[in-house]
Structures are given as C-alpha cells and as structure tokens.
Amino acid sequence: MAAPVIIERLAVIGTGLIGGSLARALRAAGAVTTIVGCDADPRNLEQALSLGIIDEAAAGVAEAVRGAGVVFVSVPVCAIPGVVRELAPFLEPGCVVTDGGSVKAAIVEECERLMPPGCCFLGGHPIAGTEHSGAAAAFASLYSGKRCILTPTDATDAAAFDTVSRLWQAAGAQVCCMEPGHHDRIFAEISHLPHVVAYALVHAVGTADVEGENVLSYTAGGFRDFTRIASSDPAMWRDISLMNREALLASIDGFSRSLAELRSRIDRSDPQGLAEFFTIAKQFRDGIV
Ligand code: NAP
C-alpha cells in the first residue's frame, strides 16, 4: 500500500546535498506530490531537475513558494535569514517554513519574526551529511535511521510541528526536539569543534617543515580517517563558525585545556598520567561505537 501524501507541494530552496536528499527521500516515500526547487546556482538547479530530484525549477523564491504547503530552506546558514525575508511576503496562508541549517538560535529568532500571520517557521537540523556538496551528491537514504532535531518554541504552531515531523519521519529520520540555544551548545562540541580541529590539524601538518619533506605524502589510514571532514566545504564551515561563534569559542577553549593537559603529561614524561588520559578517552570513544 502506498504511503499517504503528507503535502501536495514542497518548495526546496537550495537544491544541494541536504535539500536534494530530502526531496529524493520524500519522493521515494510518496510523501509529496510536486517538488519545486530554487537555487542561487543555475547549474545546480538544472542538475536537480535533470536528475529528477525536483519536478519544477523556479526562477526565484517568489515563484518557488507559490502554492507550497511547506518550504524547506537548505542554503548555507548565513544565507537562511535573508532567504526567509525574501520569500515571506509570497507565502500562502498556512504555509510552514522550515530549514536544515546546522546552527539554530540566531536563525530561529530571526525567521520566526519574519513570518506573516498564519504562517509558521520551525527550525530543523538533520544529523546526517557527507563531505560532498550539490544536487549530484544528494541521495534518498541520507536520513535513513538518522536523527533530525527540531527546535520548536512557544511560537510554534502544533499543526506545523506535526507536518514537519511527519515529513522527516517519511524521509526515514527519527525526530527529536531541543531548545535552539541548547542545540547550538551541543553541536558546538560534537560537530563544530571536530571540524575546526580537523581543519587545524591538516593546516598544521600541511604547513609543517620537516627538513623540507612533503610530510603529507607519508599519511596513511589513521590520518585520513581522522581528517575526512576537513574535505568539507570551506564556505559552509566559515559560516557555521561565525554563526555559532560564542558556543564554538567555548568549545575550542575546552579543547585547548585538554590538549594543554596532554602536552604537559608528555612534557614531564608521565607514563601513568598519559595512560590514564588515553584510557579515559578510549572508554568514551568505545562507548559510542
Ligand atoms: P550545498 O550542497 O552547497 O547546497 C546549498 C545550495 O544552496 C547551493 O547550490 C548554493 O549555491 C545554494 N544557495 C546558496 N545561497 C542561496 C540563496 N541565497 N538562495 C538560493 N540558493 C542558495 O549545501 P548543503 O550541504 O546541502 O548544506 C545546506 C544546509 O544544510 C546548510 O545550512 C548546512 O549548514 C546544513 N547541513 C549540512 C550538512 C552537511 O553535511 N553538508 C549536514 C546537516 C546540515 P552556491 O553554491 O552558488 O552558493
């Protein structure tokens, strides 16, 4: 038996990895009838259309949101409020606007204020992704078995929350809720800090001078596993770092203290202290895999 249609018309603003994958997943689940896309990059939009990710390519956001029951904004975090400001005057009454941005407090605060009467903004963040970008990187199973965090507030309409939850569930995700600021502090630790550290590590090793050798040419599995996320889009991580600045700075300070402690145990040739430090870290790591 076919799954029930949740909404007739979905607008995806930013038809890249995140927006394109949601479109693919919802189409595969039979949860939407028509998907219209809009993208600042005309080649990416054309690719989304030719790959069958979207049914219609809109020339701008006004055209994209016309008649849409849900608008999913999946552009870089710094661009989300501007996109929502641009599309808000063209929303149909009852429309729900949601996003997939990796930072929530600043986006939710601004976008809720931009909603016209009868429309609702609900922040979202799928905990799924790859280091690749664009429509060609999108795939239907990206969200399967992954979490999607929604960040409702007192202003969130219950029906809007229900619609967005059902869409993510149809895409295969497990929905959970968080207060926007709490989300940003948690993701500063478990996502934004690891990206910053991976970039810093590759930067340090790439610019290291060991008797004129190209040190990177000797790297093997461990280095590559650890640094995979340093191949992520630099512009995306610039935006996330700036938008979650305060929480990320606090996480970097915590990491710096941890690294300084480790350095000091190495410096004083403290075998027991080092073993304890590594054992505690190993136990945390073993506990999550
Ligand atoms: P992406 O593959 O680069 O796709 C984003 C698309 O949006 C690009 O084609 C981009 O065009 C376009 N765009 C930029 N500004 C726009 C605007 N003002 N109006 C319309 N289109 C615009 O990026 P993504 O990986 O899907 O990321 C999208 C969002 O998802 C981000 O907010 C990110 O924080 C979030 N997210 C990403 C991941 C991940 O692993 N990638 C995971 C979870 C959440 P240009 O290339 O020309 O800028």
Image (cartoon, rainbow, N blue to C red):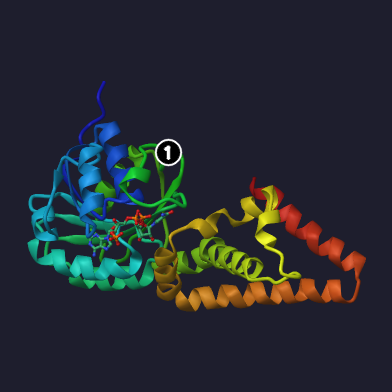
Q: Is 148 placed left or right of 282 in the picture?
A: left
Q: Position of residue 266 (x, y in %)?
A: 85, 71
Q: Position of residue 200 (x, y in %)?
A: 59, 69
Residue marked by disc 1: 144
Which of 115 and 87 lies nearest the eye of the viewer? 87
* Image point (48%, 79%), residue name: 246
* Image point (87%, 68%), residue name: 273
Q: Is 96 placed left or right of 208 in the picture?
A: left
Residue 139 visible somewhere in the drawing? yes
Query: Image height check: is 137 above or below 270?
Result: above
Query: Image height check: is 142 above or below 134?
Result: above
Task: Mark 1: give few (<14), some (14-19) or many (20+) Cα within 10 Å.
Answer: some
Which kind of residue does numbered mark 1 sit on? Ser
Q: Is 168 placed left or right of 269 in the picture?
A: left
Query: Image height check: is 276 above or below 208?
Result: above
Query: Image height check: is 162 above or below 115?
Result: above
Disc 1 CB within 8 Å of nearest ligand 1 atom: no
Which of 242 and 223 lies nearest the eye of the viewer? 223
Q: Quadrant of ligand 1?
A: bottom left
Q: Position of residue 277 (x, y in %)?
A: 80, 64
Label 1: state its secondary structure.
Answer: loop
Which of 9 and 116 lies nearest the eye of the viewer? 9
Q: Position of residue 77 (x, y in %)?
A: 34, 66
Quadrant of the image for the C terminus?
Answer: top right
Q: Quadrant of residue 209?
A: bottom right
Residue 159 visible somewhere in the drawing? no
Q: Quadrant of residue 97?
A: bottom left
Quadrant of the image for the N terminus?
Answer: top left
Seen as rendered, the residue at the extreme front is 212
